Amino acid sequence: MLLLKERRAEKRLQVNLPVTYYYAIDHDTITGNSSTHDLSDSGLSFYVDIPLKKDSNLKVDLNHIWDAPKDSRVKWCIKQHNQYKVGISF
């Protein structure tokens, strides 16, 4: 059996919280709502309906725990069933 080495610097907690995300395309700001899958001090993952490009800049807002949206970057995006799971770093 192949064991994968954990590459994260911090432990992530599995949490299901509402998240709002914002990103720019051309001169428009796109806003989406989702729910988190997991969260750490340096990033989180959540689900979206359309794929997000790796290295795209986002603002994410977890208004239940943060005072203001955080600047973040898409690290990866993978298709899972009829959605995309996105991993971001702050």
Image (cartoon, rainbow, N blue to C red):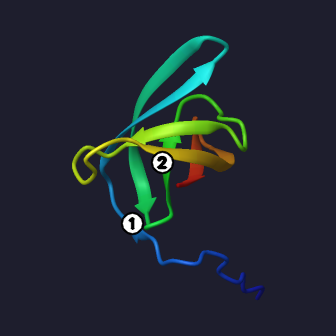
Q: Where is residue 3? Give x, y as percent.
A: 72, 86
Tell which of 54 and 57 is nearer to you. Answer: 57
Residue 13, x across and y down, in percent: 39, 70
The residue drawn where x is 61% and y is 75% is 8
* Residue 81 lies in quadrant: top right
Find disc 1 in the rendering and name its residue: 14
Q: Say what secondary structure mark 2 lies in.
A: strand
Which residue is at 34% across, 61% downward? 15
Q: Residue furthest right?
A: 2
Residue closer to the observer: 18 or 28: 28
Where in the figure is residue 83, as x and y percent of width and height? 56, 37
Q: Label 2: which residue? A: 46
Which numbered marker is on residue 71?
A: none
Q: Is residue 66 above or below residue 57?
A: below
Q: Earlier in the sequence, mark 2 or mark 1?
A: 1
* SS type, badge 1: strand
Residue 6: % across, % down: 65, 80
Give the residue displayed 39% in from the left and 66% down from the top: 14
**Three-letter residue code for mark 1:** Gln
Q: Residues within 10 Å of mark 2 (few under 14, many from 20)?
A: many
Based on the displayed image, in which of its 4 quarters is residue 33 positioned? top left
Pick out the residue farthest to the top. 27
